[in-house]
């Protein structure tokens, strides 16, 4: 994988399949994102987890949350479109150790990928910002925005290290829709793309008690769908390098 040192979503992340492709791929990414990283690609079959952590002003861990990716777009690696809250105390311990060694304060999410060749979870990256899985954390009982506000204003916040496990959260438009359209196994997805309601299912982009932003988003997506440049962008989403 050739990936930017700093970026957003999957912008600039490029998959290199053969050694002779590395130099040209690196040059393409470097032209837009200087001095990118070169990282071993972990086989796709392994589970992907994100460990969200919040440290107070004194550098003590105050809140944690772990999610597992179920679907993402682009398929080769990108923001999650469906994820599940899980309990992984081993990954929490490793993530906390890593961030504590950096003297971390505030929020960060450590991303892990389990290598199916040996079953070992390996660090992919650290996101020093709120991430796409934030809404799942909030719906599962860890309100990171409010907790971070407390840390920013008082230096500390209540400890929150337990949450609802098994809750799902979905980024439907356009994320999970694009995953469905791009996935050759779209009719065999589990859970099904057409499972729109369940007691444990929530949405990033829909709130029954505040629907106006969701309707506005649908309108924006509808307008964007009329632009050919948007569809060209979607097709090259995983490697948006200059042609």
Image (cartoon, rainbow, N blue to C red):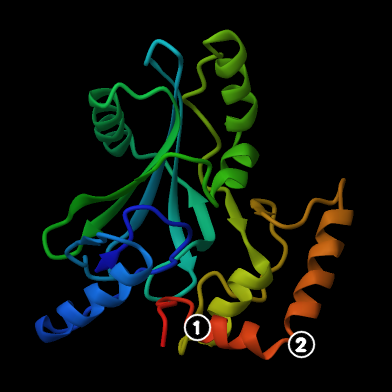
Q: Identify the residue at image location x=47%, y=83%.
A: 236
Q: Nearer the viewer, residue 233 or 193?
A: 233
Figure check: 127 above or below 206: above
Q: Quadrant of the C terminus?
A: bottom left
Where disc 2 sits, the SS reads loop
Residue that label 1 marks = 188
Where disc 1 sits, the SS reads helix
Figure check: 29 above or below 152: below
x and y percentages locating residue 64 in the rendered image: 45, 30
Q: Quadrant of the N terminus?
A: bottom left
- Of the numbered discs in the image, which one, if any, rests on residue 226? 2
> Sequence-wise, which precedes: disc 1 or disc 2?
1
- Of the numbered discs in the image, which one, if any, rests on residue 75? none
Figure check: 183 above or below 77: below
x and y percentages locating residue 112 in the rendered image: 30, 50
x and y percentages locating residue 105 in the rendered image: 41, 22
Q: Is residue 66 left or right of residue 146?
A: left
Q: Identify the residue at image location x=11%, y=59%.
A: 118
Q: Identify the residue at image location x=35%, y=24%.
A: 104
Q: Is residue 123 left or right of residue 239?
A: left
Q: Nearer the viewer, mark 1 or mark 2?
A: 2
Q: Is residue 109 left or right of residue 98?
A: right
Q: Quadrant of residue 145?
A: top right
Q: Quadrant of residue 40?
A: bottom left
């Amino acid at each position: 994988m050739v990936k930017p040192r700093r970026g957003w979503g999957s912008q600039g992340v490029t998959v290199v399949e053969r050694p002779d492709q590395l130099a040209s791929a690196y040059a393409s990414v470097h032209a837009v994102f200087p001095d990118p990283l070169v990282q071993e690609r972990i086989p796709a079959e392994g589970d992907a987890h994100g460990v969200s952590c919040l440290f107070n002003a004194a550098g003590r861990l105050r809140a944690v949350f772990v999610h597992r990716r179920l679907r993402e777009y682009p398929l080769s690696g990108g923001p999650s479109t469906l994820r599940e809250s899980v309990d992984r105390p081993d990954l929490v311990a490793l993530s906390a150790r890593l961030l504590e060694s950096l003297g971390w304060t505030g929020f960060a999410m450590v991303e892990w990928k389990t290598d199916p060749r040996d079953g070992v979870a390996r660090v992919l990256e650290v996101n020093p910002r709120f991430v796409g899985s934030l809404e799942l954390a909030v719906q599962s009982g860890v309100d990171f925005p409010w907790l971070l506000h407390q840390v920013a204003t008082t230096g500390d916040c209540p400890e929150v290290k337990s949450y609802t496990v098994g809750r799902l959260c979905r980024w439907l438009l356009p994320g999970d829709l694009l995953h469905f359209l791009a996935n050759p196994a779209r009719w065999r997805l589990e859970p099904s793309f057409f499972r729109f309601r369940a007691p444990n299912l929530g949405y990033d982009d829909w709130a029954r008690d505040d629907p106006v932003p969701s309707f506005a988003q649908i309108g924006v997506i509808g307008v964007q769908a009329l632009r050919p440049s948007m569809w060209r962008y979607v097709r090259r989403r995983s490697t948006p390098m200059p042609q």
